[in-house]
Image (cartoon, grey):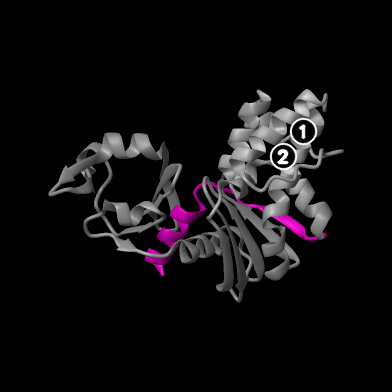
Amino acid sequence: MIGIDLGSRSVKIIRFIDGEIVEQKAYDTIEFYRHFGKNINNRLQLDWERLQLPREDIVATGYGKITVELEGAVQIPEIQAHSLGAVYQSKLSDFTLLDIGGQDTKVIKIRKSRPVDFMTNDRCAASSGRYMENMAAVLGISLQELASYSKDPVELSSTCAIFGETEIIARIVEGCSLERLAAGVNYALYKRFSTMLRKLHSDIIIMSGGGSLNRALKDIITKETGCRVIDLPEPLFNGALGCCVYSEE
């Protein structure tokens, strides 16, 4: 079976056989559509021969499941896919899932292995991985280096990804250190989803998505919430894996 997560910034594909991942691939979303898409009757369809994957028990999720036509595929909501993936990977049944994607953040409350409530912040890139990318670029550092700083953060008040760049530049001119600015970016991101974490509280928080690779953010969440924060073995492929679990069930 094949699970496909057609995300806003990247496409993740997993091939799953007898409960085991036998193949996994990740692509930039634009490059994926450019290389593996074909226009038929004004509809974008996947070219399975070029993709070199068998057309077997396909389940898809993500933004792109509406944009691109996946012939023969079952489509499921992102909340369902990510919940199934997190339960499967963590072997836990009660927790809150924090998924920080390329252009949105999802917080899902899981009880008895099923989602019982969820909230999303998809109206502004300031609560997503795109914010981290933009701020790291302004600071002239990599995402890996950005993820190193959480101490003595500069207060950043802007709630907009674009105006946030202007605020960072102003703080650089004021002479703020790189370390404090980077920590401020991580705290600013935390503050934008902290309300959702409080409303959908669990003693255990599981992180997935690209934002889960930010170690400083994990430290901040642990410190501010007092919760146990857990990583997944395959945080970037969680949605695609959840599609496979759905197919298996």
Dot 1 crowding, Cα within 10 Å, few <14, some 14–19, many 20+? many
Residue 198 painted magenta: no
Residue at 12% from the left image edge and 49% from the top image edge: 41
Dot 2 crowding, Cα within 10 Å, few <14, some 14–19, many 20+? many
Amino acid, disc 2: Val
239 shown above or below 52: below
In the visual, does 51 lie left or right of 181?
Answer: left
Residue at 26% from the left image edge and 54% from the top image edge: 70
Which region is colored magenta? 226-249
In the visual, does 183 lie left or right of 206?
Answer: right
Mark 1 touches mark 2? (CB < 8 Å): yes
Residue at 73% from the left image edge and 53% from the top image edge: 191
As drawn, the label of residue 185 is 2
Q: Give the structural element (helix, strand or loop) at label 2.
A: helix
Residue placed most toward the observer, 2 or 44: 44
Residue at 28% from the left image edge and 59% from the top image edge: 73
